[in-house]
Image: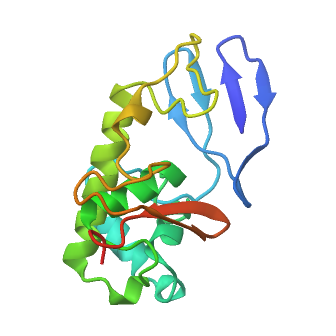
Amino acid sequence: MMVEFCSSVIIGVSVQYGRSPLERFSIQTPLLRISRASSNWGVEPFEPGAEEKFLTAVRQSRYAYKPIKGVLLDQRVVAGIGNIYASEACFAAGVNPHRSVHTLSDDELRTIFRSSVEIMAKSIELGGSSIKDYVDGEGVSGSFQHHLKVYAQSFCPSCNSQIVITTIDDRATFHCPQCQS
């Protein structure tokens, strides 16, 4: 990532998320310009038209037989959905995270996307999830972890079934076998 400050200082940062390196992105502020040089990043979930762009991206043939949670984690499809958000979004949508994309209707995919956006917005509002040691730039812990339904939970808040823990793309995956089909 290249960061250019008003004083023309440039900092280079190598960023990696999971197994795939994140390429440069852009943010423009009066004091700071961060440049996005890659077109490999997926849709920004809060931008206008994001839902339709998500549907177009997820319907590509390379994702057809992949589990939806793994596709949500792929930053080339949609930017910013991490492991916690992906498990929680699948739960909120009532979709088993192991389901292959080709088995999901457009309505189910829209519900998953909308759930992702709602969950991310709530997490941002609550300062993120401080499950281990996360703090924001001011050293304050987030509180979204107190609102998690399935991630790192033992029992489903809806039906009290035991949460099943598996892996998808080497990431812990949590789901309710009764509420998520």
Q: How many marks?
A: 0
- Tell me if I can see residue 169 in this picture: yes
Q: Residue at x 23, y 60 (%)?
A: 159
Give the color scheme: rainbow, by chain, secondary structure or one colour.
rainbow
Q: Is residue 89 left or right of residue 111?
A: right
Between 113 and 36, the one lying in front of the other is: 113
Residue that protrudes farthest toward the left in the picture: 107
86 above or below 143?
below
Q: Residue at x 48, y 33 (%)?
A: 129
Between 61 and 120, the one lying in front of the other is: 120
141 above or below 71?
above
Picture quadrant of residue 15: top right
Percent coordinates x, y for residue 158 in the rendering: 22, 56
28 above or below 166?
above
- Tell me if I can see residue 51 in this picture: no
Percent coordinates x, y for residue 45 in the rendering: 36, 51
Quadrant in which the C terminus appears: bottom left
Q: Residue at x 59, y 12 (%)?
A: 139
Picture quadrant of residue 20: bottom right
Between 35 and 100, the one lying in front of the other is: 100
Percent coordinates x, y for residue 87 in the rendering: 44, 58
Q: Is residue 79 left or right of residue 122?
A: right
Quadrant in which the N terminus appears: top right
Q: Residue at x 47, y 24 (%)?
A: 142
Q: Is residue 43 left or right of residue 113?
A: right
Percent coordinates x, y for residue 61 in the rendering: 48, 89
Between 79 and 85, the one lying in front of the other is: 85
Picture quadrant of residue 2: top right
